[in-house]
Amino acid sequence: MEYKFSDRVSNLKPSAIREIFKYAADPEVVSLSAGNPSPDAFPAKAIAEISDDVLKNNPISVLQYSVSEGYTPLRQHLRDYMKRENNTGSENDDIIITTGAQQIMDLCSKALLNEGDVVICEAPSFIGSLNTFRSYNAKLVGVTVESDGMNIEELENALKTNPNAKIIYTIPNFQNPSGVTTCLEKRKKIYELAKKYGVLILEDNPYGDLRYSGENIPNIKSLDTDGIVIYAGSFSKVISPGMRVAYCIAPKPVFQKLVVCKQGNDVHTNIWSQYVCDEFITKYDFNSHLAKLRSIYTKKADFCMDLLDKYCKPAITYNRIDGGLFIWCDLPQSINMQDFCKKAIEHKVCVVPGNAFLTDESDPCNSFRINFSTPTDEQLEKGIKILGELANNWN
Ligand SMILES: Cc1ncc(COP(=O)(O)O)c(C=O)c1O
């Protein structure tokens, strides 16, 4: 049989990270490549209690079909929570629960993008979202990420030269993969430019609650008086990625289209997971759970940065992070990044080559991404020591 795939998917390649996971599955390999929450971070006992209780006392409520918009109490609680804690969302917005934030990228693409439309992305950016935009045959235009967010001149130039730009996709807090946080001034400029050029902003914020130092910066959505920002939040990094519960706050006309698109995707998000998330954020002490996560990850992030200072200087440099789960490491020009990542695998350490996160993977890149939330402290020390030895003895 000659399989004739659609134009949309025939050029899609498996994500570089998924490919790397094949090596990472080897128990002898230290994987610094994943982005999974720490095994210590899951509120497993609370999830078991909530599930046990509902399955004993009201099983049909979580086993029956439900509505595409999402579990009503969860939507209401999130609406209140996001307004109260983050001034995010207004009476002109509505909220849809999705199957992970990944689905928000898919639904927005389905609802908003025609073939050839441009999505302006940070370069580097989250590979999962880039691949979703690609799967709708969107054209990706990358804007360099600086230490305080996108280069604004480049962004304006991208908007000027691409009149069919539809979306600016940004991860403003502790960006995956660069770890960068966009400063307030740039958030305001991104908003003004989107307004000026009639483009929507897709603000993806799965790491916002994982801040370890510095002051919180308002979400771009909190500036939205013109109905131009779509906000993506997720429980993946703060409750469980396996439960696949996320939420999207969007201007009502966009929300309505997202609901229709979701009906054709998966009808609704797993109602049992939605129920568990709702009970957990309302009946348990969600804020102290978040504080516990921050305390686990602050220790791990500091430990990881200390190891980088101890073993990797001067060859590997990096920017210190204020939150999130990733650190972006730079190699000197004298070291070829692809060769370095291959050598690291030969020495049983897995990192993600930085070019995997670019809109065009063939663009020059001498960086790689590491994650510190998944490995144990022993694994982190072993892996980072090997990276440092390789880089500092490269010839
Ligand atoms: C920036 C970013 N957006 C979205 C996602 C997808 O998250 P979810 O598990 O909610 O689909 C991730 C996952 O790592 C991410 O890093």
Image: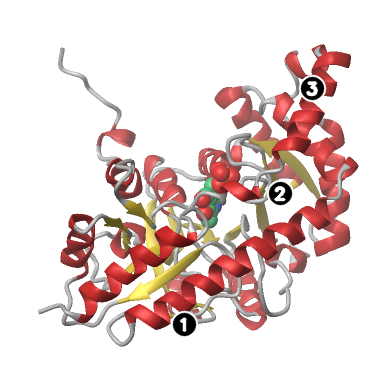
Q: Secondary structure at mark 2?
A: strand
Label 1 sits on residue: 153
What whole-number distance in Å separates the C-alpha atoms at marks 1 and 3?
54 Å
What whole-number distance in Å separates the C-alpha atoms at marks 3 and 2?
34 Å
Residue 299 lies left or right of residue 166; in this view the side is right
Mark toward the start of the polypeptide (1 vs 3): 3
The x, y position of residue 89, in whole percent, is: 80, 55
What whole-number distance in Å separates the C-alpha atoms at marks 2 and 1?
27 Å
Residue 242 lies left or right of residue 370; in this view the side is right
Q: Nearer the viewer, mark 3 or mark 2?
A: 3
Q: Residue furthest bottom?
A: 314
Residue 72 in sight in this render: yes
* Screen quadrant of the N terminus: top left
Mark toward the start of the polypeptide (2 vs 1): 1
Front residue (pair 160, 380): 380
The x, y position of residue 29, in whole percent, is: 30, 50
On whether ligand 1 comes within 8 Å of the CB at mark 3, the answer is: no
- Residue drawn where x is 29% and y is 47% of the image: 28
* Image position of 104 with respect to 342: above or below: above
Q: Secondary structure at mark 1?
A: helix
- Residue drawn where x is 29% and y is 75% of the image: 388
Q: Amino acid at mark 1?
A: Glu
Give the colour scheme shown.
secondary structure
Picture disc at residue 250: 2
Q: Residue furthest left?
A: 395
Picture disc at residue 52: 3
Q: Nearer the viewer, mark 1 or mark 3?
A: 3
Q: Give the number of callouts.
A: 3
